[in-house]
Image (cartoon, rainbow, N blue to C red):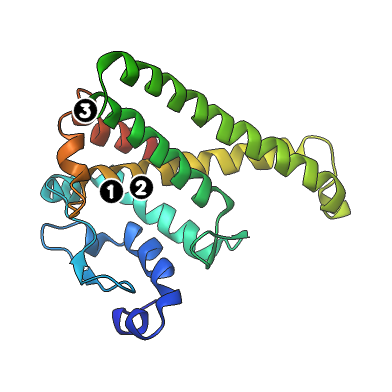
Amino acid sequence: MTQLHDVARQPALAGEKLAQDLFDHSVWRAVPPTVTLPGAQAEALFCFARAAQLQQDRALSLRIASLKLHFLTHAEARLAHGGYGPLGFDVGSVLAHLLINYCSLPGLLPPREAADGREQRLSDVHAVWDGFAHRFQALSADTQAERFACPGFMALFLQKVWADAIGYCGIAWYAIAQRQKRSGISARLRMTPCAPTVSATAGRWAAP
């Protein structure tokens, strides 16, 4: 497990620390820990106004624990933060950011522009997954081991990656929507009509 003092000495470990904290139950509380990132002051990365409710949600806690175990035990790909983990982790993170932008647009743009932007974000969600799946299948056709070259295996594997991505998206979505940052993103999100439904929907996405 990456420790805070290790992160301070080795900035490259910061991404791994953040990925672990996303699933760490100790972070899901009213007084979160702090992490010092290169060039930034120490600050709380996660602050959940609904921490008590989350701690009492047994089904969600079980799912989060399951996803964390999956994250720690499935080194399927090198992830964007530099560590290794499930293939669906980065895909889910991208989807989470697209959807949080979808929810924030009514609070950031005039109604017509926001509507157009939200339509584009939904198209982006489809494009991200379709593009990833198509590229992955194309590459795997030339590189996969012979024992995995049976018809239908790659489609089955991608179904698993999609399910993983949805789970990681749900958790990341909740974290992004709830954490308090100096950037003020949470304040803007609270202005949007769909923001109150983000937490509940993310919880359902993270459920089995």
Q: Residue under circle 1?
A: 175
Instruction: Identify the amino acid type marked 3.
Output: Gly
- Mark 2 secondary-structure assignment: helix
> Would you identify the image quadrant in which residue 109 lies?
top left
Relative placement, left or right, of 26 versus 76 is: left
Q: Residue 120: image x %, image y %?
A: 46, 23
Disc on res. 107: 3
Q: Quadrant of the N terminus?
A: bottom left
Answer whether residue 207 is visible to the viewer in this image: no
Q: Looking at the image, do the residues carrying marks 2 and 3 touch, with CB atoms under 8 Å apart?
A: no
Answer whether residue 129 is visible to the viewer in this image: yes
Q: Looking at the image, do the residues carrying marks 2 and 1 touch, with CB atoms under 8 Å apart?
A: yes
Q: Residue under circle 2?
A: 172
* Nearest to N terminus: mark 1 or mark 3: 3
Residue beneath the point at 34% across and 34% down: 101
* Nearest to N terminus: mark 2 or mark 3: 3
Residue 99 sits above or below residue 31 on the image: above
- Mark 3 secondary-structure assignment: helix
Nearer the observer: mark 2 or 3; the answer is 3
Residue 120 sits above or below residue 49 on the image: above
- Mark 1 secondary-structure assignment: helix
